Amino acid sequence: MSIPVQKHRVVIVDGGASGCRVLVTLLHEMRRRSADKGLASLCIGGGMGVALAVERA
């Protein structure tokens, strides 16, 4: 199947920023619960993922 693409209308560098949303939500929840450590899993595209561990300084 071929889908015609108008290259001048495609945004190449635009991301959904879901990782940022997940991280900020984690940080706010850590503050709300007075937690010292948090862990989030993020999708990085292409079927891959990454875990992000944060610790309060």
Image (cartoon, helix red, strand yellow):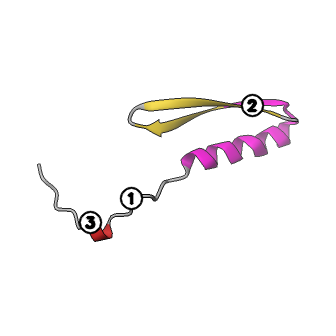
Label 1: few (<14), some or many (≥20) within 10 Å?
Answer: few
> Which residue is painted at 48% across and 38% down in the image?
44
**Which corner quadrant holds the C terminus?**
top right
Asked if residue 31 lies in the magenta stretch, the reply is yes
What's the distance in space between the residues labelled 3 and 2, CA to CA? 41 Å
Label 3: few (<14), some or many (≥20) within 10 Å?
Answer: few
3 or 2: mark nearer the eye: 3
Name the residue beneath numbered marker 1: 12
> Which residue is painted at 70% across and 47% down in the image?
24
In the image, residue 5 sits, relative to residue 44, either above or below, namely below
Name the residue beneath numbered marker 2: 38
> Which residue is painted at 77% across and 46% down in the image?
28
Q: Earlier in the sequence, mark 3 or mark 2?
A: 3
**Residue found at the far bottom of this picture:** 8
Q: Which residues are magenta?
A: 18-39
Instruction: Give SS at disc 2.
Output: strand
- Residue 23: x and y in percent read 67, 43
The residue type indicated by label 3 comes to Lys
Left or right placement of residue 45 versus residue 56 in this view: left
Q: Earlier in the sequence, mark 3 or mark 1?
A: 3
> Which residue is painted at 12% across and 53% down in the image?
2
Q: Earlier in the sequence, mark 1 or mark 2?
A: 1
- Residue 42: x and y in percent read 55, 36
The residue type indicated by label 1 comes to Ile
Name the residue beneath numbered marker 3: 7
Instruction: Give SS at disc 1.
Output: loop
- Residue 17: x and y in percent read 55, 52
Asked if residue 27 lies in the magenta stretch, the reply is yes
The residue type indicated by label 2 comes to Gly
- Residue 11: x and y in percent read 38, 63
